Image (cartoon, helix red, strand yellow):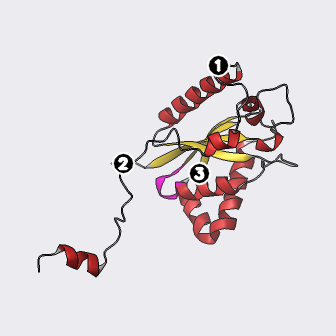
């Protein structure tokens, strides 16, 4: 029996254009606003497929059709959703989400789709969604700094990622000069 390899993408919808518009609210709350109730799984899938087709053409569209793209979870209150996609084509979806600039509804607000976790099982994706929701509530209540000095810097920073020791190496290089220098003959 063959196991079908899938990936689950946990995605947050962020609204960075409205930062500073409400000085009485913490930036973390403004950035993570609820999404419109008009957003449905079908509208989301339609927008993702259209963006993949625009970016990758027929090749990308064909990769998605065979992969069974589906929305497993959508919460407008937390602006979070989980997508299921074949392992071979999850990078197409991730790229399309990165290029989408607004909520896929009529007169959708400008937003940023942020893939926060990639998992092989839906269980781990759900656990990460719960962990992030708890962390967001803690930050909104003032557990950490209520106003974020650089909210987009926190999104793109690498401080939470493990660092590799040493310098990067080119593992795909198969130059004859390098191979000749190593050989005995």
Task: Choose mark 1 or mark 2, whichever is in front.
Answer: 2
Residue 125 located within the stretch drawn in magenta: no
Q: CA distance from mark 2 to mark 3?
A: 37 Å
In percent of the image, x 34 and y 64: which residue is there? Answer: 171
Q: CA distance from mark 1 to mark 3?
A: 37 Å
In percent of the image, x 59 and y 53: which residue is there? Answer: 94
Give the class, few, some or many, for how many residues have Cα within 10 Å of label 2's Cα (few <14, many ≥20): few
The quadrant in which residue 120 appears is: top left
Image height of 146 relative to 64, above or below: above
- Ranked by sequence position, the earlier of labels 2 and 3 is 3
Residue 165: assigned label:
2
* Quadrant where the C terminus is found in the figure: bottom left
- Kindly report the secondary structure that dominates the magenta region of the rendered protein: helix
Residue 69: assigned label:
3
- Ranked by sequence position, the earlier of labels 1 and 2 is 1
Residue at numbered disc 1 = 143
The quadrant in which residue 157 appears is: top right
Mark 2 secondary-structure assignment: loop
| First to last magenta residue range | 85-90
Q: Position of residue 103 (x, y in %)?
A: 78, 47
Mark 3 secondary-structure assignment: loop
Mark 1 secondary-structure assignment: loop
């Amino acid at each position: 029996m063959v196991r079908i390899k899938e990936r689950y993408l946990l995605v947050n919808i962020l609204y960075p254009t409205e930062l500073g518009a409400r000085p009485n609210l913490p930036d973390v709350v403004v950035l993570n606003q609820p999404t419109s109730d008009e957003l449905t799984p079908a509208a989301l899938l339609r927008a993702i497929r259209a963006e993949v087709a625009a970016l990758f053409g027929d090749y990308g569209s064909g990769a998605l059709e065979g992969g069974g793209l589906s929305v497993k979870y959508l919460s407008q209150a937390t602006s979070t959703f989980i997508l299921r996609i074949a392992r071979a084509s999850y990078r197409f979806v991730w790229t399309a989400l990165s290029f989408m600039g607004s909520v896929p509804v009529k007169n959708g607000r400008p937003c940023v789709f942020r893939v926060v976790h990639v998992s092989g099982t839906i269980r781990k994706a759900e656990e990460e969604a719960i962990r992030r929701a708890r962390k967001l509530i803690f930050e909104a209540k003032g557990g950490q700094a209520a106003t974020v000095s650089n909210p987009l810097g926190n999104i793109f920073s690498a401080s939470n990622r493990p660092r590799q020791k040493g310098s990067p190496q080119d593992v795909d290089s198969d130059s004859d000069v390098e191979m000749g220098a190593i050989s005995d003959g």
